[in-house]
Image (spheres, helix red, strand yellow):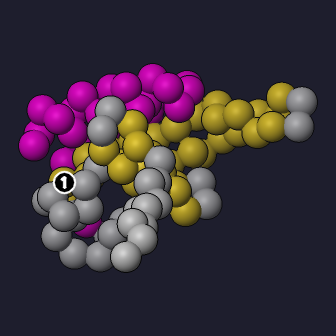
Amino acid sequence: MPATKKAKGLTYKGKPVYRKGNVIYYGDLSKNLILVLEITETEKVGEYDIAKKVKFHIQDNSGEIGKGVNYRSGERDNLYDAFDIGSWWLQDAL
């Protein structure tokens, strides 16, 4: 029987990353908390849209994704800073 490979999705610091439009969900969806990053403003650089303002928050994941209670939130001027701080908050909360 041939071995099958399981497709790997995008991860950051060992946790999965999902994107739907301008919203990025980070963390294990089986856990009770996830990080939600919302890109609210972008800037065109060449042919690419670069995040200029990002709102992020730690959210309860017990119900429908994107509809939970926000526990901690912030805003940064770029995606890297928002991801860095948000991932630390998520690790601390879990």
On the image, the x and y values in percent for residue 64 come to: 29, 76
Mark 1 Cα within 10 Å, few/some/many (few <14, many 20+)?
many
Q: Nearer the viewer, residue 12 or 2?
A: 2
On the image, the x and y values in percent for residue 58 come to: 26, 47
Residue sitting at the far front = 1
On the image, the x and y values in percent for residue 86 come to: 32, 34
Q: Quadrant of the N terminus?
A: bottom left
Give the residue drawn at x 46%, y 54%.
Answer: 9
On the image, the x and y values in percent for residue 4 come to: 42, 67
In this picture, is 34 found above or below 89?
Answer: below
Q: Nearer the viewer, residue 9 or 91?
A: 9
Q: Does the stretch in magenta take in 78?
A: yes
In this picture, is 55 found above or below 70?
Answer: above
Task: Using residue 33 as the reference point, say whether residue 80 is left or right of it.
Answer: right
Give the residue drawn at x 37%, y 26%.
Answer: 84
Q: Quadrant of the C terminus?
A: top left
Give the residue drawn at x 49%, y 26%.
Answer: 80
Give the residues in magenta: 68-94
Report the number of numbered marks: 1
In this picture, is 35 found above or below 48?
Answer: below
Give the residue drawn at x 71%, y 34%.
Answer: 50
What amino acid type should be assigned to the residue bearing mark 1?
Leu
Q: Which residue is mark 1?
A: 33
| Residue 21 appears in the figure | yes
